[in-house]
Image: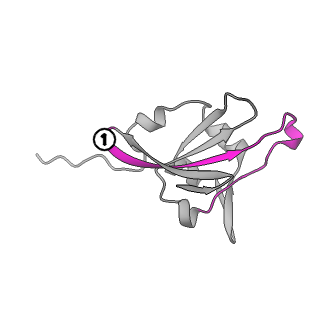
């Protein structure tokens, strides 16, 4: 389901479970002084996503930043009418093109209780 030009929402099957992913696509410029300063997102409507992917689209081989819901919330700055992820903070905590979060145990879930 497309949301708008700057991002879209997707669902994927990971290990037999449906997971939701909010994808943000923003264009960057070659000069750091002209780099984007935010990835806008409305956590009121998008905050339940399991994962957030931020795409650096400067080349035909984009750089992916995969954030779990917990990581996304830790880099989020709220303001009236929306909010932002700050790319420098995302880049500080996320290794580019590391997709291990998609296959790791969900970071915001408790381990299942033993029945024994």
Q: How many marks?
A: 1
Please give the residue where the numbered disc 1 appears in the rendered image.
Answer: 16
Q: Which residues are magenta?
A: 15-42
| Label 1, residues with CA under 10 Å away: few <14, some 14-19, many ≥20 | few
Lateral position of residue 93 relative to residue 60, left or right: left
- Residue at the image position 85 percent from the left and 33 percent from the top: 30
Q: Position of residue 38 (x, y in %)?
A: 74, 51
Instruction: Determine the residue located farthest toward the front in the rendered image.
Output: 1
The answer to whether residue 20 is magenta is yes
> Relative to the observer, which residue lies in front, 32 or 26?
26
Vertical position of residue 16 compared to residue 45: above or below: above
Q: Position of residue 34 (x, y in %)?
A: 87, 42
Q: Say if residue 78 shows up in the picture.
A: no
Which quadrant of the figure has residue 4? bottom right
- Residue at the image position 67 percent from the left and 32 percent from the top: 62
Q: Position of residue 20 (x, y in %)?
A: 45, 50
Q: Position of residue 81 (x, y in %)?
A: 68, 70
The answer to whether residue 71 is magenta is no
Coloured how?
one colour
- Residue at the image position 74 percent from the left and 30 percent from the top: 59
Which quadrant of the figure has residue 29? top right
- Residue at the image position 33 percent from the left and 37 percent from the top: 15
């Amino acid at each position: 389901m497309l949301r708008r030009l700057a991002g879209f929402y997707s669902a994927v099957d990971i290990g037999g479970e449906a997971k939701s992913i909010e994808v943000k696509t923003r264009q960057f410029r070659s000069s750091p002084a002209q780099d984007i300063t935010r990835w806008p997102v409305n956590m009121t409507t998008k905050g339940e996503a399991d994962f957030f992917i931020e795409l650096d689209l400067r080349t035909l081989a984009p750089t992916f930043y995969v954030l779990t819901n917990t990581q996304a919330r830790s880099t989020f700055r709220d303001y009236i009418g929306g909010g932002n992820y700050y790319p420098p903070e995302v880049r500080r905590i996320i290794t580019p093109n590391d997709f291990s979060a998609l296959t790791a145990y969900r970071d915001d879930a408790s381990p299942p209780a033993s029945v024994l």
